[in-house]
């Protein structure tokens, strides 16, 4: 087959070279963006009088008919034509003849590929932002529905102080809020038109990049043609934002796996989101959580592939950069899949309030409130901490003491110490902004709802 770039070659390309260099087996996913970009390019060429009106409309009709065939699975991509760009351009020339050869005027695959990637990622990212919002919405609802449930809060995975479950789960809302902000921020640097950089140096033909930018809804054009074809920062930014988001999903997964063990029994993951064992009849495994935790590794891997791929590349375009696609596509697919299944899993999650409450009994997580009690009676915190520590050393369970026994540790203890050390008391006393009192948690949920509804509008 005569290559579109075949002029300077006397020999046929070896079939192993074709196999080795082809990318169409994965970059076919960019086809509709490639066509969208080409249509805008053709319109710009006409506007700048590089194409006639007739040429423009023939090219656009041709591209539209190719698009239609791709959509209806009536188009076959040929690896001998290397990549998505050549497949479409070749088909265009076959369909509309000589005039099809004019489309690639003032364009290179180097600016074309980064245009396609920007269009693809812009579209996908909008969806990812929507998925993140839905997931946040599921978290908000579960917090609202379980507002009074008490659980032991942990540090070092040891019981620390009692907190409201809604407070704990809302921590995830804010983590995913930062993710959503990072994704939105990424969009800004994705939404810049690279086309017109051509191979690396721009073009001597009278094009208008601003016109193309306008047609494709980009907010502006890139400033430096060499940077434009060398740059994959916008993909790296997305991959790192995606990695952070997956890390958040993975931490939540870890907690749900733990909380659904027989030892905890704090939550019940709906059967619809669990799988069984081929040998042990009783099993109901949290596979979605485990797989999400596992997939986090591959998303990190994708980020590291691209960082490593880019680190030694001289400017400007290098073919190495073709290797950016699979890590990006895989990350987009994985993240979308995890976010959307997690929204459903969280919505159907059952919380076992009884078990959470039970696990606080006799756990000495009242100790900080005991120290604060003494502080309110004028004891310096360090001394109060020491006294409370001595009480804990004598017995972890506050109900084991009489007032008389407690008075041996400090004369300042009165009968009300037994109320003060109840989990409910400690929780409702923690009324500092952002704290775990039910007033503060309700306020936080309300703020989250307002902020969230305003940003989704
Ligand atoms: N398939 C290539 C890529 O993904 C497109 C650009 C090819 N440019 C070139 N000069 N060979 O990066």
Image (cartoon, rainbow, N blue to C red):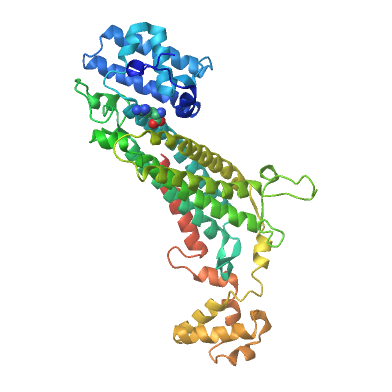
Q: Can residue 15 be seen in this view?
A: yes
Which percent across, then down, holds residue 361? Answer: 66, 72
Indicate the quadrant containing the N terminus: top left, top right, bottom left or bottom right: top left
Is residue 374 placed above or below 341 in the rendered structure? below
Q: Nearer the viewer, residue 348 or 76?
A: 76
Is residue 394 placed above or below 22 in the rendered structure? below
Which percent across, then down, holds residue 228? Answer: 29, 35
Q: Which of 442 and 346 is in front in this view?
A: 346
Q: Which residue is drawn at 48% across and 87% down?
A: 383
Q: Which of 92 and 406 is in front in this view?
A: 92
Which percent across, then down, holds residue 262? Answer: 72, 59
Q: Which residue is drawn at 31% across and 37% down?
A: 230
Which percent across, then down, holds residue 386? Answer: 52, 86
Q: Residue at x 30, y 9 (%)?
A: 55
Question: Which quadrant holds residue 30?
Answer: top left
Is residue 17 placed above or below 45 in the rendered structure? below
Indicate the quadrant containing the C terminus: top left, top right, bottom left or bottom right: top left
Question: Which quadrant holds residue 109?
Answer: top left
Question: How many dots with numbers?
Answer: 0
Is residue 97 placed above or below 400 in the rendered structure? above
Which corner quadrant of the figure contains ligand 1? top left
Q: Is residue 183 visible?
A: no
């Amino acid at each position: 087959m005569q290559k579109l770039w075949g002029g300077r070659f006397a020999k046929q390309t070896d079939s192993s070279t074709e196999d080795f260099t082809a990318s169409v087996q994965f970059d076919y996913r960019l086809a509709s963006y490639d066509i969208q970009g080409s249509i805008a390019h053709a319109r710009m060429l006409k506007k700048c009088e590089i194409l006639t009106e007739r040429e423009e409309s023939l090219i656009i009709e041709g591209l539209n008919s190719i698009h239609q065939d791709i959509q209806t699975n009536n188009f076959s991509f040929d690896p001998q034509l290397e990549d998505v760009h050549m497949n479409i351009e070749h088909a265009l020339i076959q369909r509309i003849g000589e005039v099809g050869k004019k489309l690639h005027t003032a364009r290179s695959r180097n600016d074309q590929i980064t245009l396609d990637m920007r269009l693809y990622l812009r579209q996908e990212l909008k969806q990812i932002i929507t998925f993140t919002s839905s997931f946040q919405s599921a978290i908000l609802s579960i917090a609202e529905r379980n507002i009074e449930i008490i659980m032991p809060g942990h540090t070092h995975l040891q019981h620390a102080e009692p907190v409201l479950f809604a407070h704990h789960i809302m921590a995830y809302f804010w983590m995913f809020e930062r993710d959503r902000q990072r994704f939105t921020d990424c969009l800004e640097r994705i939404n810049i038109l690279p086309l017109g950089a051509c191979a690396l140096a721009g073009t001597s033909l009278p094009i208008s990049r601003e016109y193309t930018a306008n047609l494709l809804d980009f907010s502006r054009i890139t400033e430096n043609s060499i940077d434009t074809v060398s740059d994959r920062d916008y993909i790296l930014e997305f991959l790192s934002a995606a990695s952070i988001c997956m890390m958040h999903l993975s931490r939540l997964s870890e907690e749900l796996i733990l909380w659904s063990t027989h030892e905890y029994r704090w939550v019940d993951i709906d059967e619809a989101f669990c799988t069984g064992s081929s040998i042990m009849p009783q099993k109901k495994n949290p596979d979605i959580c485990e797989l999400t935790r596992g997939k986090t590794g591959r998303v990190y891997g994708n980020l590291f592939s691209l960082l490593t791929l880019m680190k030694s590349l001289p400017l400007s375009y290098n073919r190495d950069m073709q290797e950016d696609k699979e890590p990006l596509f895989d990350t987009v697919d994985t993240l979308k899949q995890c976010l959307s299944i997690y929204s459903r899993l969280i919505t159907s999650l059952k919380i076992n309030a009884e078990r959470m409450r039970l696990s606080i009994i006799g756990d000495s997580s009242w100790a900080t409130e005991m120290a604060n009690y003494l502080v309110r009676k004028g004891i310096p915190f360090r001394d109060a901490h020491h006294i409370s520590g001595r009480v804990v050393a004598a017995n972890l369970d506050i109900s084991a003491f009489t007032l008389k026994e407690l008075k041996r540790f400090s004369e300042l203890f009165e009968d009300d110490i037994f109320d003060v050390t109840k989990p409910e008391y400690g929780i409702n006393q923690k009324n500092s902004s952002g704290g775990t009192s039910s007033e503060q948690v309700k306020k936080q949920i309300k703020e989250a709802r307002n902020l969230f509804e305003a940003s989704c509008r």
